[in-house]
Amino acid sequence: MTLTIQRDQTPESFTLQATKAVTLLSALYEIKSKLDPTLTFGAGCCSGVCGSCAILVNGKEQLACGYKYQDNDLIEPLRYHPVLRDLKVDKTKAHDTIKKVVGQPHTSTEIPTLSDESKTKKQTDCILCDSCYSACPVLAVNPDFLGPFALTRAWRYIAGSPQRNQGRPQGGAPTIAAIQHNGIWDCTLCGECTVACPQGIDPKTDIMMLRGESGKAGYSDPNFAVQDFGTPNFGSGFV
């Protein structure tokens, strides 16, 4: 079995003894212990909970601890993250997007009801593996885009506890305002983030819900203002 790992923009192949149903993370550990001790990658719980081992396999986001590797797989670091070394990336900039949308921190007296929690139960399963961020094509053209998991967190914040937001100055208005620029309107709704999520979260739908809430708050898609709908211009002030 051969695995090819992208290292400093140079692919390097490693040959392993063929083993059935072995996870990619186990293979990476084998390479590090037997073939190249300098190989660097992220790992943590080894149970699909911490998200540390997220990488690209043949161009698709995977958790190395859960993926069963195949012969000739190409392994690469996540997209849109600074590469620290080999498969290890710096997630600081991506995770800082959450700070831009969440607003005020929770306090001990702000306890959401079970009904509130049920509205965003699936969103709470996010493990911040950054798979959705890596899969998002918008970041290829706009590196300042907030990204899918930050917008899912915004929706969780807005929808998960209306009582909490109502008790704050301006309610959830600061969060809604924070997602207008480089946020919900920049998303193409392609759904790649939803496909990439190992937890089954649907950021695309969360973003659509945030657009609805933004409309209620008086916001609209700024792209409409610059679109040309083919209306003829007759001059003399008539359009």
Image: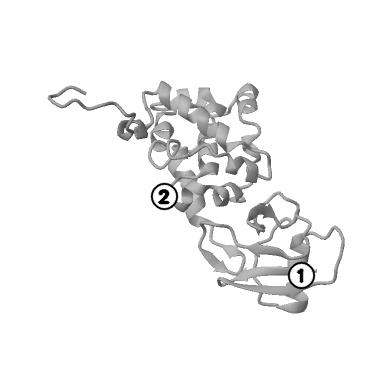
> Where the C terminus falls, by quadrant?
top left
Determine which residue is flagged by label 1. 2
Q: Residues within 10 Å of mark 1 (few under 14, many from 20)?
A: some
Q: Nearer the viewer, mark 1 or mark 2?
A: 1
Element type where label 1 sits in the image: strand
229 up-or-down from 147: above or below = above
Q: Amino acid at mark 2?
A: Asp
2 up-or-down from 199: above or below = below
Determine which residue is flagged by label 2. 144
Could you tell me residue 97's position as x and y percent?
A: 47, 47
Could you tell me residue 233's position as x and y percent?
A: 22, 27
25 up-or-down from 165: above or below = below
Element type where label 2 sits in the image: loop
- The numbered mark, 1 or 2, whose residue comes first in the sequence reads 1
Q: Amino acid at mark 1?
A: Thr
User: In the figure, is residue 169 to the left or right of 162?
Assistant: left
Residue 183: image quadrant is: top left
Could you tell me residue 5's position as x and y percent?
A: 66, 69
Q: Nearer the viewer, residue 112 or 42?
A: 42
Q: Is residue 157 visible?
A: no
User: In the figure, is residue 184 to the left or right of 66?
Assistant: left
Q: How many marks?
A: 2
Q: Nearer the viewer, residue 10 or 41?
A: 10
Q: Measuring 57% from the left and 32% from the top, which residue is drawn there?
A: 205
Q: Is residue 91 visible?
A: yes
